[in-house]
Amino acid sequence: MTADDLGTMPNVTFDDLGLDPKVLQAVKDTGYTTPTPIQAQAIPEALKGRDVLGIAQTGTGKTASFTLPMIHMLSRGRARARMPRSLIMEPTRELAAQVAENFETYGKNNKLTMALLIGGVSFADQEKKLDRGVDVLIATPGRLLDHFERGKVLLTGVQTLVIDEADRMLDMGFIPDIERICKLIPGKRQTLFFSATMPPEIQRLTKAFLKDPVRIEIARASSTATTVTQTLIQTQKLDKRDVLRTILTNEDVKNGIIFCNRKRDIGVLHRSLVKHGFSAGCLHGDLDQATRMKTLDAFKKNEIQLLVASDVAARGLDIPAVSHVVNFDVPSHAEDYVHRIGRTGRAGREGSAFMIATKEDAKYLGAIEKLIERKIDIDPVYGKKGAKPAKAVEASADKAAEDAKPETAEAAPKKSRSRGRKKASDTKAEAPVETKVETASEEPASTSEAEETPPKKPVTRKPRAKAKTAKAAPQPVETASVPDAPAPRKGNKTHDPFEGHMPAFMARPIQPRAAETEDA
């Protein structure tokens, strides 16, 4: 069955799908009257008990395609302890929590119990719900297997199995867990299998676990919604943030999701946006569950305008009013591009999707355009001229900083060195000396740095010590010349100025001279 078959069903409403009146009333309370193509075709087949293979792009209402018929069928019967009657498998905690919200909304008129098994939540609270018995179990593969290995849940009573976002399960490496879970469930069951893309591994899985399924393909696999305007911006790697800020400033962004490939880049980009005055939050797998749910809830309530996220937010999150999606990084997997831009343009609304690419992304960009079978329009403004408004602000700030540099440049040499700081303190102590001798302060100014360094070490007391030694120095010279003076030689021979303690080195020249005077 394809989308063309829907054209033969004019004016289809939820009343025509065969749902229970209580379920129909809950749907009407939400404001929906007309089903989407995937809902109009999948719900009647699911109510017949047949396996369904649904292939549809994101934002087409796949969640209601399996929750509505499941609530209808679960209204008959009773849950037993630790034995859920139906099981819904989701790849991420956010998707699982969203399905749980939809289940509560559509099943409010039915007395059905539900348990949500996801990571980041206490095991004890989940075990209490399982012990009381639940009609529907919504879980991620890892946490479900943890409970199973603890003996807290039995899967032998599952009558309906739903595998949602199967291609995402494949990307996250959950296919071995899914195969194990499918083997724990009775073979006589109904399986509803939904995916946006159908890679070979997913096709193998459907052949192994679905029995004569009804294939419902609303749109070509890996196609993008026609309500989304796609734009490619080519720029340099260092200019990506400037381009992003320009897009957010020039476009009419009511709220938007910005996707990055790496978790560490999410934190850096988030802080950058907040620093530039944008209302932004971040969402990735390393955050604890409470923080993730709080951030997502704030984004849904428009308390924050932008959400910087990883591919955790790319699959199935139902936020109808997202006006813009920006791929800050080109996704390395082409299928992720389809899911990312599927966050906007939902439920018939128009949306805009931008992708910032560099030369290094040529390989991934080619794979994306090959998958969606179209060329993405290149914007000639944002990539080249669009970054200028954001840079102009920074350039003006840099110019102002440069204008202030000449004033600081004069003081910089004094403060650029640690010696300069000491010199500033030393000059204060040496100031009185410089005022007394002006020539001494002028001469070092013309000398080299090697000649300037010695005066830095002595303190003001050392020059005074040198002055004393300079005065005392001539006295030994005068006494040294006493033996050579004629007056002592002409005096009495018995006169001995050294009082018998003359040094030996002076005895030789004195004795000949004394002999000459005796001869004379």
Image: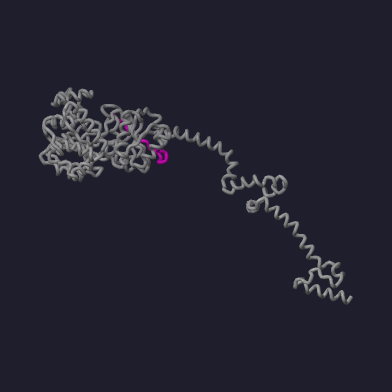
> Looking at the picture, does residue 338 appear above or below residue 27?
below
The x and y percentages for residue 210 are: 14, 40
> Residue placed at 59% from the left, 42% from the top?
411
Q: How is the image coloured?
A: one colour
Can see residue 190? no
Which of the image's four quarters has the N terminus? top left
The reply to whether the magenta stretch includes residue 238 is yes
Answer left or right for 380 relative to 319: right
Looking at the picture, how far across and down is residue 474, in whole percent?
77, 60
Of 300 and 155, the residue lying toward us: 155
Q: Is residue 21 left or right of residue 381?
A: left
How far from the left and from the top, in percent, is residue 397?
50, 35
**Highlighted range, magenta:** 227-240
Name the image quarter holding residue 491: bottom right
Is residue 324 something one can see in this rendering?
Answer: yes
Q: Quadrant of the C terminus?
A: bottom right
The picture places residue 490, in percent across and down from the top left corner, at 87, 70
